[in-house]
Amino acid sequence: MPQLSWLQAEQTPNFPDTSMALSEPEGLLAAGGQLSINWLLSAYSKGIFPWYSDGEPILWWSPAPRMVLIPGKAHISRSLKKHFRSIDIEIRVNTCFSEVIKRCSKPRAKTDGTWIIEEMRDAYIDLHEAGWAHSIEVFQNQTLVGGLYGVGIDSVFYGESMFSDLTNASKYAFIALDEWAKNNQLSLIDCQLYNPYLESMGAKLISRNEFEQYLPIRETQLSFEKNQSLTTLLERAFF
């Protein structure tokens, strides 16, 4: 029976093989380590991500099956098309990453807390400043109303969290990301865990073996252009 590995923070990242992940709780692989850029890049390159609550050690996960979106496969419903025609929004990239992750960290309805605690926010802001983490932002009348953030390595975007202060705003961020990923020949958008919301948007479950075939070959950054707008790409998806 697989045993949970404890990772020493003072050592270089050395994650166990993902086949050692526990079945209960599903996908838990290791504990300990740290949230430095080096550790996070090592984890994501292997399809591993951190997820834990305040007061817990850092917990590292590799769930199976894995929720993913193949670029270009986002589903746009007729009701969403109708809603899109009734609003005026703009999609931006990396203009307010810290604010996006702050909004994502707010407790959701029917929950008492958040897993995006301060040290997690600080770690992903460091990743962003180093060029590895990105935010897709939805603006209406120059006001941030929705968005998502994640980590980009080689041809994979690892989605982390999203928020909406306007109906469907996170869907528009997700579809804009999908269009950008398709146009830039990304191989995969990782959505991590099953979610009926994401399934309705076109995401699907695949096995760990299939998922790991998409993992980065090189540790290179995704190249969003400075001050890039994805509004035109989003409009193309709807029209």
Image (cartoon, rainbow, N blue to C red):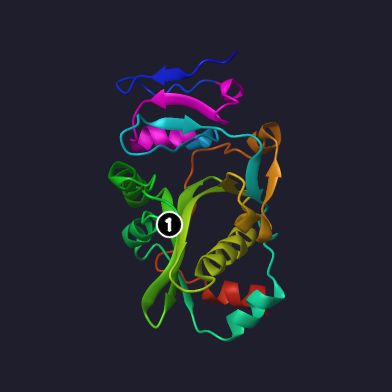
Residue 52 belongs to the span the image colors magenta:
no
Instruction: Name the residue located 44 percent from the left edge and 38 percent from the top edge.
Output: 51
Q: Range of the magenta residues?
A: 17-43
Using the image, determine if residue 77 lies above or below residue 2.
below
Query: In the figure, residue 92 lies in which quadrant?
Result: bottom left
- The image shows residue 200, relative to residue 119, as above or below, that is below
Label 1: state its secondary structure.
loop
Query: What residue does disc 1 label?
Result: 108
What percent of the width, then of the height, locates residue 177? 56, 62
The residue under the point 64% across, 48% down is 68
From this viewpoint, which residue is outermost toward the bottom?
A: 86
Q: Taking 10 as reference, is 140 left or right?
A: right
Q: Quadrant of the C terminus?
A: bottom right
Screen quadrant of the N terminus:
top right
Q: Nearer the viewer, residue 217 or 48?
A: 48
- Say left or right for 228 vs 120: right
Residue lying at 31% horizontally and 46% vertically, measured from the top left: 126
Image label count? 1
Locate residue 158, reporting x and y percent.
52, 47
* Vertical side of 32 occupied by 146: above or below: below
66 and 79: which one is in front?
79
Question: Is residue 212 something one can see in this rendering?
Answer: yes
x%, y% of residue 50?
A: 44, 36
Q: Is residue 31 magenta?
A: yes
Image side of residue 141 versus residue 178, left or right: left
In which image quadrant can residue 55 be found? top left
Residue 133, how many percent across, how many down? 42, 50
Which residue is more in the foreground, 9 or 54?
Answer: 54
Q: Is residue 187 something that shows in the picture?
A: no
Report the amino acid beneath label 1: Arg
Classify mark 1: residues with Cα within 10 Å, few (<14), some (14-19) or many (20+): few
